[in-house]
Amino acid sequence: MQRCICGTCPSFPGDDGFYCARGKSQNEVVRRGCICGDCENYKEFGLSKGYYCADGSAAEIEE
């Protein structure tokens, strides 16, 4: 999780992070902006969505 930047996101719901791989948060997510696109994991794995914390993992929502 060293490369995960979820904890610096304005929408971070306050739990473990790494939502693109783990899936959505158990906590409520207030959408205040998304920085998924700035993450090295996002770039390395060719992700294209955002708000994984609210919507689910990349495997669940990427097409």
Image: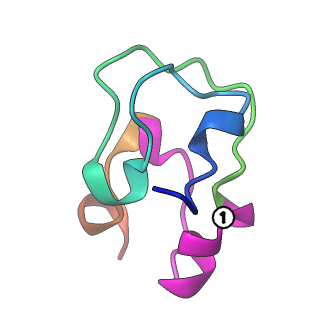
Judge by depth and name the residue closer to the eye, 25 or 7. Answer: 7
The quarter of the picture where residue 27 lies is top left
Q: Is residue 52 above or below residue 7?
A: below
Image coordinates for residue 60, horizontal then vertical, percent: 24, 60
Type of amino acid at the residue the image marks with label 1:
Cys
Q: Please indicate whether residue 3 sits to the left or right of residue 9 in the image.
A: left
Bounds of the magenta span?
37-53
The quarter of the picture where residue 3 lies is bottom right
Viewport quadrant of the N terminus: bottom left
Q: Please indicate whether residue 59 sits to the left or right of residue 9 in the image.
A: left
Q: Is residue 43 above or below residue 54?
A: below
Q: Please indicate whether residue 1 sits to the left or right of residue 24 in the image.
A: right
Q: Which residue is mark 1?
A: 39
Image coordinates for residue 4, horizontal then vertical, percent: 55, 55
Image coordinates for residue 33, horizontal then vertical, percent: 75, 35
Q: Is residue 13 above or below residue 9?
A: above
Residue visible at 58% across and 43% down in the picture: 6
Image coordinates for residue 40, horizontal then vertical, percent: 64, 73
